[in-house]
Amino acid sequence: NGATSDIHITTHGSDWYWAVCAVMTVATFAFAGLAQTKPRQQRIFHYITAAITMVAAIAYFTMGSNLGFTPIAANPQRNDPQVHGTYRQIFYVRYIDWVITTPLLLMDLLLTAAMPWPTVLFVILVDEVMIITGLVGALVYSNYKWGYFAFGNAALFYIVYVLVWEARKHANAMGKDVGKAFLICGSLTTVLWILYPIAWGVCEGGNVISPDSEAVFYGILDLFAKPVFGALLIWGHRGIDPARLGL
Ligand code: RET
């Protein structure tokens, strides 16, 4: 047991990571295929959404292959090395995925609500702060990681505020169909995004749950946040000409 507990590594995660990779791949082809049913000028949401699942498919290919991680020393004051290992497997590749895909998800939502581009730009920059502080916090060994976690949560708080308040009002003003599409996708996003820091807290942060459980936790969140979200968003746009949103 000594050898396996030295690095707290996923042993059953791989099959599940491959399954999620397969779903992301199928979703990418589906969204890209649906784009072909529209004139070129009306494909923006298809393209953004297909790009999101395309990046995720490659991130999951990486994790299914047991790559894209680095061992980080587990805090011995917090974790019993016998139970939690001396090191924890930290998948930094998630953050490479998120730094590309979370701005695209926000573009899907904020362009649906026809928010002005300075707002879109600023929300994306705050989103990048959220992801990068999460990455640095995950790679830090000491309790400073919780400082980074706090910055990330402050960033998420601002993003959620823009979504549930400013963008929701703006979407409603664009018409009933736009308001409804935004309400469905914006609500799903708000609930899911609040669960990510909880997952981080028990995985990269506190090393409370195993990397196998981490695979399931983040995997389910990612399936809802990308392919399910994407399908609902594209469906919501079925009767909306992007020209109406200034696109
Ligand atoms: C971190 C840790 C730092 C604090 C916060 C976080 C939030 C992450 C979020 C990630 C969303 C990812 C998505 C992926 C798509 O599949 C970085 C975990 C607040 C909200 C939607």
Image: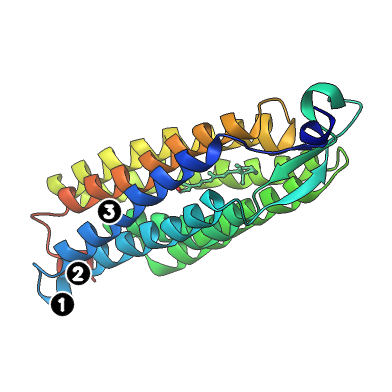
Amino acid, disc 2: Arg
- Camera-near label (2 vs 3) is 3
Amino acid type of disc 1? Answer: Arg
Q: Residue 164: x percent and y percent? A: 40, 39
State the image coordinates of residue 34 (x, y, percent, origin top left): 15, 62
Depth check: give the residue in front, 194 or 34.
Answer: 34
Q: Residue at x 64, y 40 (%)?
A: 153
Q: Mark yes or no: residue 34 visible.
A: yes
For image coordinates 82% across by 48% down, the residue present is: 140
The amino acid type, in three-letter code, at marker 3 is Ala
Q: Which residue is mark 3?
A: 27
SS at mark 3 in the image:
helix
Q: Earlier in the sequence, mark 2 or mark 3?
A: 3
Residue found at the far right of this picture: 77
Q: Residue 87 sits in which quadrant?
A: top right
Can residue 80 be seen at all in this image of the molecule? no
User: Residue tagged by mark 2?
Assistant: 43
Residue 105 x/y as whole percent: 40, 55
Rendered location of residue 149, percent (x, y)? 71, 41
Front-most of residues 64 and 150: 64
Badge 1: few (under 14), some or many (20 or more) residues near its Cα, within 10 Å? few
